[in-house]
Image (cartoon, rainbow, N blue to C red):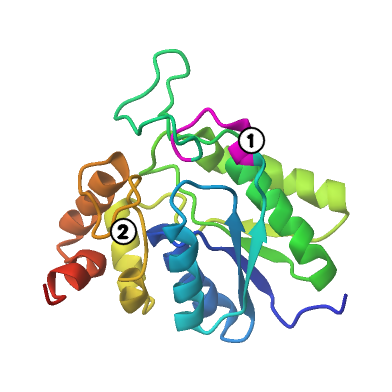
Amino acid sequence: MQPSVSQALVVLSGGQDSTTCLYWALDQFGVGAVEALTFDYGQRHRIEIDCAIKIAARAGVPQTVLPINTFTALGGNALTDAGIAVQSGVDAQTQLPNTFVPGRNLIFLTLAAAFAYPRAIHHLVTGVAQTDYSGYPDCRQATLQALEQTLQLGMACDLTIHAPLMFKSKAETVLMARDLGAWPALADTHTCYHGQQPPCGECPACVLRAKGFAEAGLADPLVARFHSSPS
């Protein structure tokens, strides 16, 4: 395969954080030097993929949707297993939310690195954050640092993982999205764990998102989009 003209590959889920990171990458690496990779991993709410496609098209970046259905086969969490309802709080045994998909970010970034390798892309961008997150251990800085080193060694390549939101609160992420010009794209994002549009406003993801916009003192473009639509 011929090397890509892109310098950076953004893991784009269709959510608020990865969308913000897409615009961060465009700001850092320039228009024409960024592409997106979206994973079809058997998530219950296919709307995420539709949103990611709209967002990539709006931003004018090439996008690949990569099918990986292993997580559906593994099951055991509320994001891939239709028999498990989203719950607030954490599991008494694991001390993690039941929306935690074990290994998801590790697998995503490993596959992203494998995708980037033959295209000579040396920068991976992900929207994970440990400051204002749901308790997922694969969103921590230490996890990403260890994975980056593993990928560099395992693929014998110069590879950097960027996590621009790692130490930002949701409010800071909202302000960052505004400043980077991602505001219109946020209207196309999806966060709700129940897969609803307009968002349910009650699941942990919706509550965290709403908290961020409230603390930033700004209206959520996604919510405004539905409120302004004719009935």
| Structural distance between the alpha carbons of marks 1 and 2 | 36 Å
Quarter-of-image position of residue 229: bottom left
Q: Nearer the viewer, mark 1 or mark 2?
A: 1
Query: Which one is earlier in the sequence, the residue at label 1 or at label 2?
Result: 1
Residue 74 on the magenta segment: yes
Residue 77 on the magenta segment: yes
Seen at 80% across and 61% down, the residue is 158
Q: Is residue 179 visible?
A: no
Q: Which residues are magenta?
A: 71-79
Seen at 39% across and 76% down, the residue is 180
In what element is the residue under mark 1?
Answer: helix
Q: Which mark is residue 172?
A: 2
What residue does disc 1 label?
73
Give the answer, above or below, for where 221 lies relative to 161: below
Coordinates of residue 104 in the picture (x, y in percent): 59, 42
What's the amino acid at mark 2? Glu
Coordinates of residue 11 in the picture (x, y in percent): 58, 61
Seen at 45% across and 75% down, the residue is 54
Q: Is residue 131 visible?
A: yes
Quadrant of the rendering where the C terminus is positioned: bottom left
Quadrant of the rendering where the N terminus is positioned: bottom right
214 relative to 8 in the view: left or right = left
Give the answer, above or below, for where 34 lies relative to 76: below
Coordinates of residue 174 in the picture (x, y in percent): 30, 63
219 relative to 47 in the view: left or right = left
What's the amino acid at mark 1? Ala
